[in-house]
Image (spheres, rainbow, N blue to C red):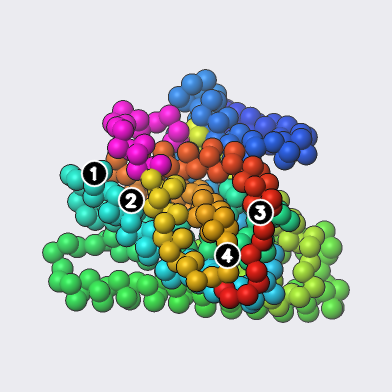
Amino acid sequence: MAMGSLMELLDIAILSVLVFSYVLISARLEKTPWTSAILFTGLGWLLGPTLLDLIRFQGDLEHLKELAELTLALVLFSDAASANRSALGKYKSLPLRLLLLGLPATVALGMAAAFLLFPDLHWVSIGLLAVLLAPTDAALGKAVIVSPDVPVQVKESLNVESGLNDGICVPAMLFLLMLDPSASASDLVGQFSTLLVRELGIGLLVGCALAWVGSQGMRIAQKKKTISTDWQRLCLPALAFSCYSIAQLLEGSGFIASFCGGMLYGFLDRRHDEENLLSTETMGNVFAMFTWMAYGALIVGHYWQDFRWQILAYALLSLTLIRMLPVALSLIGTSLTVTEKLFVGWFGPRGLASVVFGMQIFFSEVDAKQEIILCFATTVTLSILLHGLSAKPFIRFLGSTPPSSAGNT
């Protein structure tokens, strides 16, 4: 057997044993601040080429990119399908404020901070850095999304925001990667508008169309009893991957398709087939464990030879001021208390979307690629730690404060 195959088998064996071991003590771990993202990123770093060199994933960042994309699509579909639609209808203005006001302001403030800390970077690289770190990841703040101590309007707003902001950022990321600085302003505006409509429009149409077809197909199959109970659990993961891949093939946003498809499927399937949703969420969790371990092995510990204090400063600003100030401003005039606004601002963890975007930059020819990757890796690694460790204490603190009224939102 070839050495490459042996290394692949060793990687799979170690990953499988670690996932099995985690499951055996998962009930205990859920009572601690140590999330699966923290543990598997740390294990990837420990067992990867940087230290023990037991797992290598063939040193292939292309595989990490593909794995992260599929994981994100599955998580987005699952979270959207299980969202509380009655709460979203009641508090829909909150995620709209976060997406339409908070997200652009976050990108603008991120660019301003990068101009100050990295004055030698081209403005395109600065724009890429700001867009790369703007999307949030609800999966890293799962404890917040599922906790009964967090107000419904807060957790559903965070869930919808994280589901859509990465898809909204995709056109901006692609536009900056393909940008010709010599083009006229009108040409650039036209190119971006076309890209925005194409990415969002195709993603929305594909996701909604496949969700409707999938929902009707399952309903007919169940009525005619042509679907096996054992096999129907695979329907939703297959539908999630279909939304993502078909939208991508049509040059739309697979992430928008996954989220919108999941949202519409959850609306059409009012019975909320919990078992099917649970199987999809479980598969997403397993994919996420593999992704974070690959991230720890291939990214954490690498590319640090050019590390400077400005990298750490930007990462800390990205997780605090750059995120929290725009969120606070966008939520002015809502019924949320000051504590709840700060809570929403803090729980904007950077995760799978930033990994996906970071891999796109890695395979591009953009200037200052090393510096951008360092900022991305530092920010995501700090986010995994800080948001994971702070989730339960902050939830307890939020639960001890008077809740907001259900009035003006």
Gap between marks 2 and 3 measured at Cα: 36 Å
Residue type beneath disc 2: Leu
Tell whether label 3 touches label 4 (CB within 8 Å). Answer: no
Picture disc at residue 336: 4
Tell whether label 1 touches label 2 (CB within 8 Å). Answer: yes
Picture disc at residue 401: 3
Q: In the visual, does 222 lie left or right of 116?
A: right
Task: Give the quadrant of the N terminus.
Answer: top right
Picture disc at residue 129: 2
Q: Which residues are magenta?
A: 298-316
Nearest to N terminus: mark 4 or mark 3: 4
Mark 1 lies on residue: 118
23 vs 381, nearest the viewer: 381
Nearest to N terminus: mark 3 or mark 1: 1
Gap between marks 4 and 2 measured at Cα: 30 Å
Q: Nearer the viewer, mark 4 or mark 1?
A: 4
Q: Is residue 270 visible?
A: yes
384 vs 267, nearest the viewer: 384
* Disc 3 residue crowd, few under 14, some 14–19, many 20+, Cα 10 Å: few
